[in-house]
Amino acid sequence: MSTALANFLFEAVNFLLLAVVLAWLLLSPVRSALDRERQQRARQLSEDQTREHQARQLLAQARQTGEQLQQELAEERRRLLDEARAEAGQLREQARQAREREQQLAEQHRHAEQVARLQELADVIGQLGAASLRALLASLQGPDLDQALIRAALQQLVELPAGLADLRVEVARPLTAENHALLDQALGEHVDATLDASLGAGVCITTAAGRVEASARALAREAAEQLAGAITGGQA
């Protein structure tokens, strides 16, 4: 082998070795930088994906929260509307009841006025009827009327619960012998009757247990009360 060829080969080998060493020295930082860049981009991509995933989760939660809020707002609106309707119904019912009470009070007032007027009229008619009945009974001047009233009083006297203590007898007219004997026999003692012309006819017997009156005055008073009651009761 010639010296020129050997030098050429030696230089070629040196060049290759130098090229390899330079390539290794120059490309290694670039390769490292590229690796770091790839790793950084990978981390960035992973972080971006993580943030995107978190953002999607937050968006889903926000949508869910918004839907829940809308549902709660809708329920609250329905509740408030129902309460407003119920309150309005109560107010209408209270107003209706108030109107009914006013109508009832007005009706009761009118009825009371009518009853008062009818009572006044009934009292007047009863007084007139009583006066007429009293005059009629007073015109029957006979012992039969007094005797009938005395017998009626004695029948009522039997219903009194106690005895004849504190006996007092009042008659409208002087007693005949027959009527006197009738009273003595029924009362079990001699009767000292006192005259009371206001009785009209008949007798009034008073004891400690009560009073029994069978007279024209009592009949007239009862007739007046029944007439007044019939008029006011019929109107009611």
Image (spheres, rainbow, N blue to C red):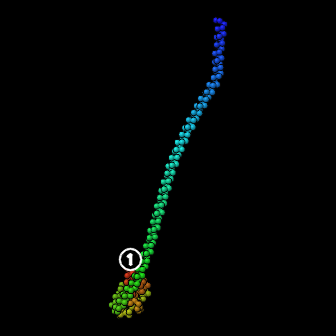
Instruction: Identify which residue is drawn at 57% across, 37% down.
Output: 51
Q: Nearer the viewer, residue 204 or 167?
A: 204
Left or right position of 96 against 2: left
Instruction: Identify which residue is drawn at 50% across, 53% down.
Output: 76
Image: 89 above or below 188: above
Please say whether residue 48 is visible from this viewpoint: yes
Image: 114 above or below 203: above
Quadrant holding the N terminus:
top right
Q: Quadrant of residue 118?
A: bottom left
Q: Nearer the viewer, residue 22 or 78?
A: 22
Q: Which of 123 and 224 is in front in this view?
A: 123
Residue 52 horizontal/vertical position (percent) = 55, 37
Instruction: Identify which residue is drawn at 42% across, 88% down.
Output: 168
Q: Which residue lies furthest to the left in this view?
A: 144
Q: Which residue lies furthest to the top in this view?
A: 1
Which residue is labeled 1 in the image? 235
Q: Nearer the viewer, residue 222 or 210?
A: 222
